[in-house]
Image: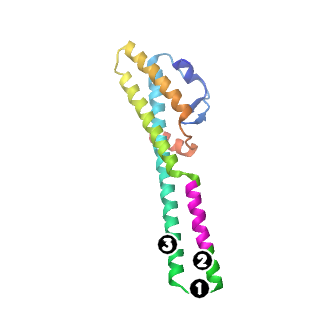
Amino acid sequence: MSYLSLLFCSANISGMYIKMTQPPDLTNKADVLSRWLKRSRESQLSHHLMAEKLSGRHTLLGVVIVVVTVLSGATTIAADLGPSGKTALGLFTLFAALLTSLQTFLKFEEAANQHRLAGAEYGKVRRKLELAKTLPEDQCDTRLKEAEVDLNKLAQESPTVSQRIFKEALERSV
């Protein structure tokens, strides 16, 4: 697929499809280069924002798990509980186990790391494109072809960024 045809179809930005309402006006390599540079910047930022969001969720869930576990352990040690207290303590302990299972199942930190890596890869492509803007025509063509391969690979392998996070990245990159 040529670098022009890549831009005329629906574009996969970080795993999220965005339908273009009309083909962009790309009459030369400079236009392609500028568009890819913009897209790389937006994708880099959106993946870093997604990584921050997922790391925050991981930390919040971890703190809640620690608090619930400590409270149930302290209650067990400190109190002589009646039947209803024992039931409440049992439910509290089950709640802690449920939260721990959720944290393991949802894998927020693993997903955050995947987004960090994708953001770093988009940053690498962005720098390659920035360099291409300064190079002579023949070297620029080589960099564009390399960037095309990198962008296609990233579009297939990168985790999906939520639409809300991607819109936030678009607003920040203006």
- Left or right: residue 169 versus residue 84 is left
Magenta-span inclusion, residue 101: yes
Q: For mark 2, what is the residue? A: 89
User: Neighbour class for label 3 at 10 Å: few (<14), some, many (≥20)?
Assistant: some
What is the quadrant of the C terminus in the image? top left
C-alpha span from label 1 to label 3 = 17 Å
Up-down relation of residue 82 to residue 135 (above or below):
below
Q: What amino acid type should be assigned to the residue bearing mark 1?
A: Leu
Kindly state the secondary structure of the residue where label 3 is placed.
helix
Q: Earlier in the sequence, mark 2 or mark 1?
A: 1
* Residue drawn at point x = 52 percent, y = 29 percent: 153
Place of residue 40 in the rendered image (x, y in percent of width and height, measured from the top left): 46, 32
Residue 81's mark?
A: 1
* Residue drawn at point x = 47 percent, y = 45 percent: 113
Q: What amino acid type should be assigned to the residue bearing mark 2?
A: Leu
* Residue drawn at point x = 55 percent, y = 40 percent: 159
Kindly state the secondary structure of the residue where label 1 is placed.
loop
Disc 2 + disc 1, Cβ < 8 Å: yes
Q: Earlier in the sequence, mark 1 or mark 3?
A: 3
* Residue drawn at point x = 52 percent, y = 46 percent: 111
- Residue 1 lies in quadrant: top right
The magenta region covers 91-104
Q: For mark 3, what is the residue? A: 70
Foreground residue, 79 or 174? 79
Q: Magenta-highlighted stretch: main secondary structure?
A: helix
Place of residue 86 in the rendered image (x, y in percent of width and height, measured from the top left): 62, 81
User: Neighbour class for label 1 at 10 Å: few (<14), some, many (≥20)?
Assistant: few
